[in-house]
Image (tube, grey):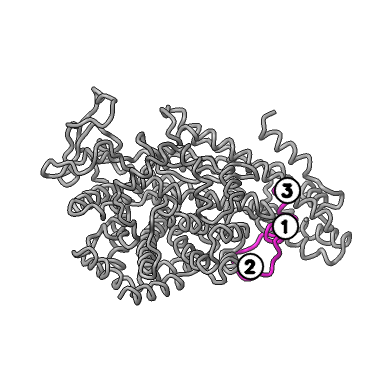
Amino acid sequence: MNNVSKIFAVLMATAVIATCLTGHSNAGKGGLSWMDESITGLEEKLVAAYGEEQRARLQRGIHQVANLWRGSDGDAAVFEDFVTRNFACDGESLDAMFERFERLLTILRGSMNAIGVEFSKQVDLDIGRVMPFDGIFAAYSPGAHVLDDFFENKLAFVVLLNFPLTTLEERLEKGNEWSRREWAEVRLAQVFSKRIPSDVNQALAEAGALSDQYISNYNIWMHHLVADSGERLFPHGMKLLSHWNLRDQIKADYRNGGKGIVKQRMIQRVMERIVDQTIPEAVINNPHVDWNPYTNEVTKAEVADVDVPTPEDMKITNEREPDRRYEVFLETYKAARMVDPYSPTAPSLIARRFDEDREIPEERVREILEQAVSSPLMPKVAALIEKRLGRPLEPFDIWYNGFRSKGSYDEEQLDEIVSKRYPTAEAFDEGMPAMLEKLGFSKEKASYLAKHIVVEPARGSGHASGGEMPGQEARLRTRVGKKGMDYKGFNIAVHEMGHNVEQVFSMNDVDHTLLSGVPNTAFTEAVAFVFQAKDLELLDLSVETDEIAEAYNTLNDFWATAEIAAVSLVDMALWHWMYDHPDATPAELREAAIEISKDVWNRHYASIFKKKDVILLGIYSHIIHSFLYLPDYPMGHMIAFQIEEHVKQAGNIGTEVERMTTLGRIAPDLWMLKATGSRVGADALLDAVERALDVIQ
């Protein structure tokens, strides 16, 4: 018997907890003609047995079960017997049920996580050749059948019979009155709020794996970009992943003098060709060709970046990528749409992302994002950037990062410092305790955290992956080149370390594992941003800390937040467009993406940049492979700012991050009120920007 079978055997053996276990549903759900009569009879029978005080719980529980009961689950006799045997009629039985489900589901999640980590390791990590079957392993979802199994064996119905399903409105309005145990019960019931077939879950996993593979291999070999003059602007061996590394190179080139702007313009042209799919297919992840992104001409490479010889059968052609970017995007949409019929309370990915995952209504998120990117402070900050650059703004200046001081170090010096200190992923791993101490964690707590985090060399840009049960390691994946980690990689790794610290605390130190995590992804991004902002200090480099330097840091945060808020509005609009055009082709989606990117740009940036119809906001790889994830970033920036402001007052990142992250997965505003004393929003950032401009001007 394998581990998964053993877990199910244990779960089955403990399904019936006490002899008084008993059960609420839309009458006649699924066309079951007997359901109304069964519900009425059960309610009266069990109220007579257990008392009028149990009526409300019985009504709710019976209807929750009936809502998802199918004819294949059994007839009236089976339904009535199930409810009668599995209703927890007293506090002792309910406590035992809750504690056992919490423990066993944690074991299940942790075991599935361990399998998933191992199955996707060859694809995720830079540890050697990826063979065709590795992608199949990575696409396999060991948990794809779990929900289906739990409904088949009726464990899901045990939960639905005894614990409350809640609406977003209830969680927002009543959550501040609930105990920690009540919040944990809510999270337990939410696990079984949908009955999604295993083949749908598997399709979701496969679409996610396919899009991950597509994006993780979308590299541009920069030394092979050729200007009209024939000049090669980028160093030998440089390979940049779209969009992360391309964007970060634009940021880095603000410190490279006159040649920097030439390089930035070239990267912008590369990005535009990726978005509109005029990029030649032959240049993607290919060090054997040279490419002029302005003329779009492709020729055989005149320089060698790799030891592998040019394939003899390689075709050198200018033919564009055949809308593969949007084909992959459509596949994620189609997979997500398969869930819709099984999610009556959130019948679209859009609703699931906002109402269930973020637990902040979409309209409120949109208002917060537009409050930032449409702020009257934007042109004031833009004018200051123009003054500092000594030239009119160009579209790539949405990624301007010259406000945040890097002292007297340029990118090459920072690369050298980082590569010497962290030549391998193992070196970064060994250096974590010292870095965590610098962030304010005690020596003991830093050691505790480092022991729960393992650092691995990523094939893509890097990411953080948390454990799913206490004691399980969190994983920090970061890209490390042959010459060691560079500064961009270090900056990303510090960001991911913030995620890992949150993951360790919110899994191992929370009072209920059902509350493990944070309210939504924006909150873990917020913690990661707090860490990332300290990257230079972690390298023991001097950083300005006076009032003016702090004001510039605030402007940097604001400009970055506005940029990713605009990108998020593109992401949101694209998902609405796909739902409005369910039969769209990749070519039609491409045209829609171009028009939506232009529209968002024209509404928020055209008047500032004096340029219309820019499509750069469509470049983010998250749009293609992350299922409407992007809004978490600007929300994360704003939450991070609120947290940073609070930490400044409290004086210690370590102790405050630990306190905050152990609040667990409660409602976002409730978490924020307990953590910082204020609700989630843009006001704190905008107020700080006004003060910063006053200080500077």
Total numbered circles: 3
Do callouts 1 and 2 mark residues in contact (Cβ within 8 Å)?
no
Q: Dividing the picture into quarters, in which one does residue 382 lie? A: bottom left
Residue located 77% across and 62% down the image: 57
The answer to whether residue 440 is above or below residue 332 is below
Q: Is residue 585 visible?
A: no
Q: Compared to 135, does 550 lie above or below?
A: below
Viewer-nearest of labels 1 and 3? 3
Query: Where, quadrant-wise, is the N terminus in this rendering?
Result: top right
Real-space Cα separation, disc 3 to disc 2, in angstroms: 24 Å
Which secondary structure, mark 2? Answer: helix
**Residue in front for this viewpoint, 427 or 686:** 427
Q: Which mark is residue 101?
A: 3
Element type at marker 3? helix
The residue labelled by disc 2 is 170
Picture coordinates of residue 70 (x, y %)? 67, 48
Query: Magenta part of the protein: which range?
Result: 156-185
